[in-house]
Image (spheres, grey):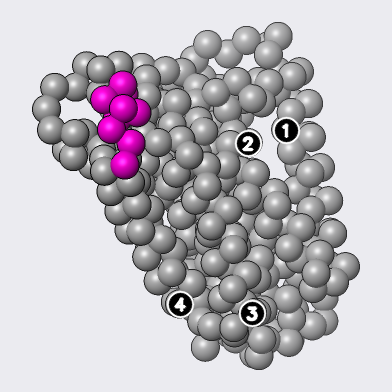
Amino acid sequence: MTDKNFNPANYKPRLISASVILLIVVVSILLRQISEATTYLFDILIGFMMIMGAFEIESLLKNSGKPAYIVGMGVFPIISFIALIVCISYETTFLTYLAVEIGLLVLTFLLLWLIIASFMPEFCAKQMSEDGFIGNKWCYVARRSMNTIIGCIYPTFLLSFVFLINHFASFYPQNSVDVGLLGLVLLFVTTMAADTSAMLTGRFLKTKKINLEKLGPGKTWGGFFGGILGSIIGALLVFVCFNANQGYAEAFVQNGINVWIFLVIGLFCGLFNMFGDISASFIKRRAGIKDFGTMIPGHGGIMDRINGLVFNCLIVFIIILSIFGA
């Protein structure tokens, strides 16, 4: 969504990075089609996003004067995946999994707060001194633990909806087609199409900037609407491709799905993707940084690449749940 500071010299590494990411996503989706066991391989990719994203958010919080406990943020994605396996093994509902996730967030806060404040006084005192905090240690640890939970929610908890999309068949086995495959393709196609279209239209159309300086000085209305248009086009392409398969075509007819439904889906995916992008820009501007990290050449950190996907996965899950979860 930006047309500012565009440097053609940075385009090549950005293109190479985007191509590598696309290849990894495509291969991961293809591997999940081999068997039920390989479905979990896709979770490794999501888990990697969660952990690396958590590290970047922890660094951002620290630089913003709101330090967190990196151990809690790093371990939470692993706990989330274990909770998923347990819920699938016991054939629970997705609501049970979400309840477990929320319970784990509360438990993580309580454990960090009680253990560090009660049993690690020297460690706690050292951190309070480094942060220049003057006051009660219980208040200090509570604040730091709450910052940790914020990092667990964004991105880990939100990305856990990709787990639910990937294993949709485990929670709703009555469908005759792999709804999880449809959801994942829809998620990544609309997200990547929106990001690419927003970048191109924002840089080359030279439209009026969005008059919200805190959201990023380079945000333009051309990039905003271009991103939504790209998402709509991506969703329509997904419909065309899947509708060419007899099984999915029959499932679409049975559930009253047509091209207009996918147009609306693309619209909502585009809006949520743009919301994620703008939210990430707002967070970075508040922290006084340009990028979340430097992991991906030409893009920045992992969170710079998935800021739209983090919110888009929620809307995609709600969409496939409302259509195929009855």
Do callouts 4 and 1 mark residues in contact (Cβ within 8 Å)?
no
Q: Nearer the viewer, mark 1 or mark 3?
A: 3
* Quadrant hosting residue 255: bottom right
Numbered circle sitting on residue 96? 4
Among the two numbered marks 1 and 2 on one chain, the one whose residue lies closer to the N terminus: 1
Amino acid type assigned to the residue bearing label 4 in the image: Thr
Amino acid type assigned to the residue bearing label 2 in the image: Thr
Residue in the picture at 33% in, 46% down: 115
**Majority secondary structure in the magenta region:** helix
Residue in the picture at 66% in, 60% down: 184
Q: Report which residue position mark 2 lands on.
A: 196
Q: Secondary structure at mark 2?
A: helix
Do callouts 1 and 3 mark residues in contact (Cβ within 8 Å)?
no
Whether residue 214 is visible to the viewer of this picture, yes or no, is no
Whether residue 293 is situated above or below residue 273 in the rendered picture: above
Q: Report which residue position mark 1 lands on.
A: 18
